[in-house]
Image (spheres, rainbow, N blue to C red):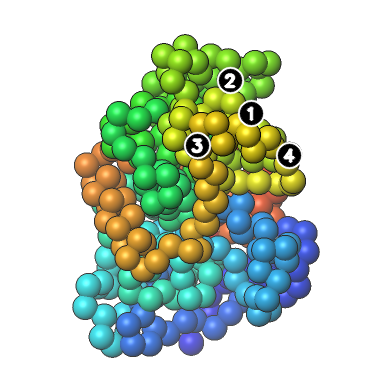
Amino acid sequence: MFVMKAIRVKEFGPPEVMQLEETPDLIPAAGQVLVRVSAAGVNPVDTYIRSGIYRPDLKLPYTPGLDAAGIISAVGPDVRHRKVGQRVYVAWSLSGTYAEAVLCKEFQTHPLTDRISFSQGAAIGVPYGTAFRALFQRAHAEAGETVLVHGASGGVGIAALQLARSRGLTVIGTAGSEEGMKLVLAQGAHHVLNHNSPGYLEHLSELTCGRGVAVILEMLANVNLDNDLSVVATNGRIVVIGNRGRVEIDPRAAMSKEASILGMTLYNASERELESMHAAFVAGLSNGTLVPVVSREIPLAEAATAQHAVLEGSTFGKIVLVP
């Protein structure tokens, strides 16, 4: 029997509870495929789950990770649309992606064009899924509208920039450094603002000809939400993607503009919504409008280092683990 290595979490706690262990190889059942992992994506939600604050009901021990990319090494009975040797990216799985191999339902895998590396493929699922759901399934953004992407130099932010540009929106991104601002412009933003500069939101009136921003993607609502209400357009939509605490707002600001504050989580996406977004991703990856940005590749054994790094505000693009 082949023995593979995987990260295992036996108790909730700090990143150091993750340990690389040998585990029996996985065998796909009916409708399942086995993917040999070339890269696994590291997402902030992975850290929330590992700490016990997001999924305290999760059965221990478990292998972390939602995203990966690699080559299908085995298929179970009744698999009709995937084949051994096929390049795929993984979005969700049955066994966890921080491993040398991952067991998936057939349609938790998606074709990966040769023009995209495995590390880039591991940067698709959660970041692009979150951005797509926020923009198009929650805010119903339309061509010609203006979108403000807070924290646009991160994994979700870059995905949002590329997706919004591909749909004909005017994109304004924010970052906290010169390097980050250059990256945001390079990834398709029409305008970029430094969110560490006092009064940076005041520029939005000029950039939107006084109308305000139609759609705001909010990565840190406890810091920005009240200010977002001051710059959102009439009938505008603010989608809360990330939050790390409570916030006080003046509801009158939402009332006067008939603005909407929308929550979102990828976990609530229906099967049809997931099918729709991944069809868009496969097309965008193939035609070159979507190009994931990977900032760091870290060995699988150093998963704790990767999870510490993914929460640092200075991280650009995506962090991936390499078995």
In three-dimensional space, the C-alpha distance between marks 1 and 4, rounded to whole angstroms, equals 11 Å
Amino acid of disc 4:
Glu
Who comes first in sequence, dot 2 or dot 1? Answer: 2
Is the residue 147 above or below the residue 69 in the image? above
Q: Amino acid at mark 2?
A: Leu
User: Decide: marks 1, 4 in contact (CB < 8 A)?
Assistant: no
Task: Report which residue position mark 3 lands on.
Answer: 258
What residue is at 54 percent from the left and 44 percent from the top? 261
Label 2–label 1 contact, CB within 8 A: yes
N-terminal of the pair, mark 3 or mark 1, is 1
Relative to 234, 227 lies left or right:
right
Mark 2 or mark 3: whose residue is earlier in sequence: 2
Q: Give me the residue at 45% from left, 15% from top.
A: 210
Which label is found at residue 201? 2
Mark 2 or mark 4: name the one nearer the start of the chain.
2
Judged from the image, the secondary structure of the residue bearing numbered disc 1 is: helix
Eye-nearest disc, 3 or 1: 3
Identified by mark 3, the residue type is: Glu
Q: CA distance from mark 2 to mark 4?
A: 18 Å
Which label's residue is closer to the chain start, 3 or 4? Answer: 4
Reading the image, the residue beneath label 1 is 227
